[in-house]
Image (tube, rainbow, N blue to C red):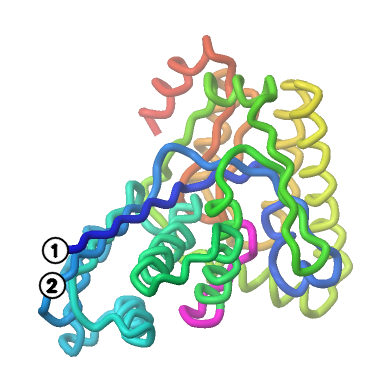
Amino acid sequence: MMRISAYSPLRVSFAGGGTDISPFLEEYGTDVINTTIDKGVYVSYVEDSSPLEITSRDFLKTVVFGGNKESNFQEKIMELFMENGIVKGRLYINGEVPPGSGLGSSSAMVNSILRIIQELNGNFKGNMELARHSYEIEKNFFGITLGIQDPYAIAEGGFKHMSSRGKDVVFQHLENSHIMKKLDEGMIIAYTGSTRESSEVLREQVKRSEKGEREVIGKLSDLKRIAVDLTGNSVDGDWENFCKNINHGWEIKKSLGSKVSGEKVDKIIDLSMKSGAKASRLLGGGMQGFVLVLAEREDVWKIQSQLRLV
């Protein structure tokens, strides 16, 4: 019995998110800085002679092709496999965080699913081709509003600056920097207790960008510059300004739309900063999910203890 497994890590974005989304991406290019983390999405396929079946803890049920048609997303996964000639077997999907959490979980899942399909069909062409295909499938096939950051960051992996001024995505890896050590020692990811559908949050930004609103274009351009500044901070090992720039980026980010932040998010960020954090911001498109907190190693336990009270 053949068994194929794929794993895609989740990502934490420090700055530049939103600049990677059309139409701003095509007009002005993108700069983002992010890192993958040790949590992710596992997808396994087991060959057998029965009709294709999908089981996922995140979906809370098992779906068999041709059965109940309650979930459009599940149906689309089935359709994707059927279009690629895979009509039998069992597919298991397991994410280590809830979907819609701001860590790129949907891109990680699509990335892993496509890796399974490519392996089954014997046409895997490398991580960058996988990222390109993943972005196109997530945007055009599943109908999700997203930027290029997640599929490419997840496929490439590591702590890095990403930029694109056309069709190509360029990476500058920063793993050997002093900042990477500080992140390993003092990065906390705090859950707000609920998730959101990222497309809903991002549509407001996309509509305003499509209209060419100068305010939105200016703020997105500022986020690009902050991502570049953070990259410079990483190269220089400047932890103080790295944290200050993250805070500055968050102030700009939450002014891009009415649904970017919320009462629970603000409470977590405020409590973190009052407890000694150096930087804090919500991850992902906005509203709910996980909050990033950066601190000195000696302050991590105190901050974690305070956040348990939220």
Q: The disc labelled 1 sits on which kind of residue?
A: Met
Q: Closest to the observer: 212 or 104? A: 104
Kindly report the distance in space between the C-alpha atoms of the residues bearing marks 2 and 1: 7 Å
In the image, residue 270 above or below residue 74: above
Q: As drawn, is 148 to the left or to the right of 6?
A: right
Residue 57: image quadrant is bottom left
Residue drawn 53% across the image and 24% down it: 184
Q: What secondary structure prevails in the magenta region?
A: loop
Residue position marked by numbered label 2 in the rendering = 48
Asked if residue 128 is among those painted magenta in the image, a careful observer would answer: no
Please tell me whether mark 1 sits on a helix, a strand or a loop: loop
First in sequence: mark 2 vs mark 1: 1
Horizontally, residue 167 falls left or right of residue 134, namely right
* Residue at (52% x, 68% y) in the render: 134
Say which of marks 2 and 1 sits in front. Answer: 1
Q: Which residue is mark 1?
A: 1
